[in-house]
Image: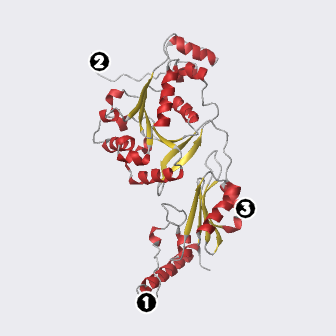
């Protein structure tokens, strides 16, 4: 009996021979034109960038192949349980510390030329006709669609995958949306109108840039969570961590947004770049590509196509960032998050059932902690005088 590797090699060899034969037949009178499958571009397990993986490529060769995709949140455990006999390829993540084992990629073969691929965010059907491919997807979607957990907001964590750019769904806990009284306690009575004006701009404008400036702990991220809940029906929020800011200048980034736009064309997109000081500073050799990417995405010809609203949080002063980013027409909002004066901090602390230890200004983080921020006394290094 051939092992898995030998079987795969044999199947590929047979497919190549069939393709070569088809190519030789081309040009002869009465011979049909055929398409040659490039198996070098295929992947053993996953469907990516619209290219079927090896089992699909081998099964269909140059014959008719139709694909149907559906985005969503899928219960892979249930998919395996209900179709265990048809499971053809799989990738499973083993538990690490307090996590549990989970399926990552699944491929089911439901017939000689009938395949279904699934991961947590999409299912893809492969068949000889468009109707059959759609039927495969519709059949599994009825039983394996996850019911959304109650949430006050959702964002999508962008990450660089092995083959392309991916996004992971992150749901926020309940009560991240502040009522009017709580919002005023957190950010001051004069902040309500500023918030309403900003929300109106996000609903009206298709693209642009907003900058949230403030020292750590002053409530920039807390406000973003509130914003995600307020706009959850009309907007999709995408978060790019500082460590992966380089995706802004990658060619795949444009393709990722184009795919998202095709799927969610009825929603506005907001991209969050947290702690993006380095990416916004006046252009130099170390950040030129990132600044240029933000300029193009927020107010260039590319912005007309992608329609992205970008929110950057910074800890430095706006005076230090590239002047081109502050140009009127590009900048939707520049908001400074300040520390709370003592009277304001006391009102917020009282509402939380906390007492403040000293009469001074406080950050939101310090009020929630209920004590002064811990200080580290660093050794002094220098020359004695």
Residue 76 position within the rendered picture, expressed as x and y whole percent measured from the top left: 65, 56
Pointer 1 residue: 29
Which residue is labeled 2 in the image?
384
Going 34% across and 35% down the picture, which residue do you hit? 325
- Lower sequence index among marks 2 and 1: 1
Q: What is the distance, in whole Å, between disc 2 and disc 1 at their CAs?
A: 95 Å
Helix, strand or loop at label 2? It is: loop
| Residue 53: % across, % down | 53, 67
The colour scheme used to paint the residues is secondary structure
- Front position in the image: 51 or 96: 51
Q: For the point 51% across and 81% down, which residue is it? A: 14
Q: Position of residue 133 (x, y in %)?
A: 61, 66
- Residue at mark 3: 82
Label 3: state its secondary structure: helix
Question: Is residue 218 at all visible to an observer of this figure?
Answer: no
Task: Please identify, in this view, whether the residue under mark 1 or under mark 3 is nearer the observer.
Answer: 1
- Percent x, y of residue 151: 64, 38
Question: In the rendering, which numbered label is found on residue 88?
Answer: none
Corner quadrant of residue 347: top right
């Amino acid at each position: 009996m051939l092992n898995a590797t030998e079987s795969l090699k044999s199947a590929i060899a047979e497919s190549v021979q069939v393709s070569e034969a088809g190519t030789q037949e081309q040009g002869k009178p009465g011979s049909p034109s055929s398409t040659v499958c490039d198996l070098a571009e295929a992947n053993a397990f996953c469907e990516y960038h619209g290219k079927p993986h090896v089992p699909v490529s081998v099964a269909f060769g140059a014959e008719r192949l139709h694909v149907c995709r559906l985005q969503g949140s899928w219960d892979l455990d249930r998919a395996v349980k209900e179709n265990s006999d048809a499971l053809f390829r799989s990738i499973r993540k083993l538990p690490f510390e307090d996590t549990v084992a989970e399926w990552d990629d699944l491929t089911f073969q439901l017939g000689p030329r009938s395949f279904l691929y699934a991961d947590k965010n999409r299912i893809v059907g492969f068949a000889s006709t468009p109707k059959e491919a759609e039927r495969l997807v519709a059949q599994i979607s009825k039983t394996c669609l996850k019911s959304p957990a109650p949430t006050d907001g959702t964002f999508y964590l962008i990450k660089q995958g092995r083959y392309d750019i991916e996004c992971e769904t992150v749901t926020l806990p309940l009560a991240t949306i502040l009522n009017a009284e709580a919002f005023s306690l957190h950010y001051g009575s004069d902040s309500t109108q500023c918030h309403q004006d900003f929300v109106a701009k996000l609903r009206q404008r298709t693209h642009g840039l907003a900058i949230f400036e403030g020292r750590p702990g002053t409530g920039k991220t807390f406000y973003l969570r509130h914003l995600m809940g307020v706009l959850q029906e009309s907007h999709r929020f995408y978060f790019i961590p500082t460590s992966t800011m380089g995706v802004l200048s990658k060619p795949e980034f444009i393709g990722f947004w184009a795919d998202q736009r095709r799927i969610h064309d009825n929603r506005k997109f907001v991209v969050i770049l947290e702690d993006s000081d380095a990416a916004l500073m006046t252009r130099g050799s170390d950040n030129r590509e990132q600044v240029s990417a933000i300029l193009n995405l927020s107010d260039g010809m590319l912005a007309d196509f992608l329609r992205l609203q970008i929110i950057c949080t910074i800890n430095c002063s706006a005076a230090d960032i590239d002047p081109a980013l502050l140009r009127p027409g590009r900048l939707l909002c520049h908001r400074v998050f300040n520390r709370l004066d003592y009277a304001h901090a006391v009102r917020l602390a009282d509402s939380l059932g906390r007492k403040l230890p000293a009469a001074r200004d406080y950050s939101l983080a310090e009020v929630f902690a209920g004590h002064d921020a811990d200080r580290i006394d660093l050794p002094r290094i220098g020359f004695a005088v």
